[in-house]
Amino acid sequence: MSGATSARVRRRWPRRVALSIGLLALALALIAGGVVAFAPQRIVQALLAHKSASLGLASRQVDVDGVRWHYYEAGQGQTVVLVHGIASTRAVWLALAARLGARHRIVIPDLPGWGETRPLDGATVDDGIDAQAARLGAFVDEIAHDRVVLVGHSMGGAIAGTLAAERPERVAGLVLLDSFGLDAPPTAFERQVRGGDNPFLYRDAAGFERANAFAFDRPHATPAWLRRGLVRLNADAAPRIEAAFARLAEPAQMRALQRRLGEIRGPVLGLWCRGDRIVDPAALESLRRGLSGDVVMEGRLLEGCGHMPMMEQAVPTAAAITGFIEGIVMPAAGGRSTPGLR
């Protein structure tokens, strides 16, 4: 229906229909108010569903080796898999998704144990980097037949890098954003976690603001109703978050990516925020030193962000990733980009 036709139809609606719609809107507003007061986390989830749909991201599911994966998908061409970090979900990539999805096929999963992705038998997920890399590899085999570009953030960087080292035949390129698992000086955040005070575990507004101060260079003001929802979600996930941090604090996990860098064969892009308070930017130099001499690497420090470049600096982050894919990865593959499975 054209815009003009639609307008004519609306003008012919009887007054009683318009009144009914107004009453329905009022009822929905009252219901929403109740949800915000008593179950604010549902509003957060509804907002994310609306936002992802408005960006053209299809929400999909696939069962792989006993795990039901939930993921977003959009675009066509070179498959780019975006891997989130600890205590996070696929939602952190929304600001980046529209920019990358316009030029490539993007796939954004919730990792097993996070977001909506769960083992079908309800088992507890091992957050060890090697275990998660193996699961991610099985997922990639299911959703793509081309070699993929892996983009990993924080813990997701260590997982993506480990998969790139173990299965170079499946990975065309690797992008690491403020990645965990590399040699770097301990940050105040790391010292605090080791001391038993994890800022990512919070149960009130003050704790939420403290976590944001670590994660972001310039935290934005969050509406009180939205903050309540996020606090509730975090409190519900507290045991899961605590167990994951304990697992990743093991010495072998802390250097999980560093010890595998020499096995990576494809090109690598390292992006770090200069203001990262969670993973020291010196990790970028550790990445450079650990790679084999014949691996093409680009490294860049981004200004104006903390630990979340895809959220705080989505435009330059997307530009850097796109330039890396189209300037290095695709030419190395003969300039071809094979559409992934739909």
Image (cartoon, rainbow, N blue to C red):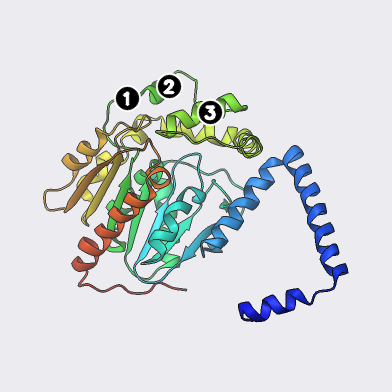
Reading the chain from its start, which is encountered first: label 2 or label 1? Answer: 1
Eye-nearest disc, 2 or 1: 1
Eye-nearest disc, 3 or 2: 3
Q: Position of residue 96 (x, y in %)?
A: 42, 54
| Viewport quadrant of the N terminus | bottom right
In-front residue for pair 24/143: 24
Q: Position of residue 335 (x, y in %)?
A: 22, 72
The secondary element bearing badge 2 is classed as: helix
- The answer to whether 206 appears left or right of 271 in the picture is right
Q: Residue at x 27, y 63 (%)?
A: 169
Reading the chain from its start, which is encountered first: label 3 or label 2? Answer: 2
- The answer to whether 113 appears left or right of 45 in the picture is left
Residue 209 tag number: 3
Please report contact status of discs 2 and 1: CB closer than 8 Å, yes or no: yes
Q: Residue at x 19, y 68 (%)?
A: 331
Question: Pointer 2: what residue?
Answer: 194
Q: Callout 3, which amino acid?
A: Glu
Question: Pointer 1: what residue?
Answer: 186
Residue 201 in view in this figure = no
Binning the other alpha carbons within 10 Å of mark 2 as few (below 14), some (14 to 19) or many (20 upward) gives few
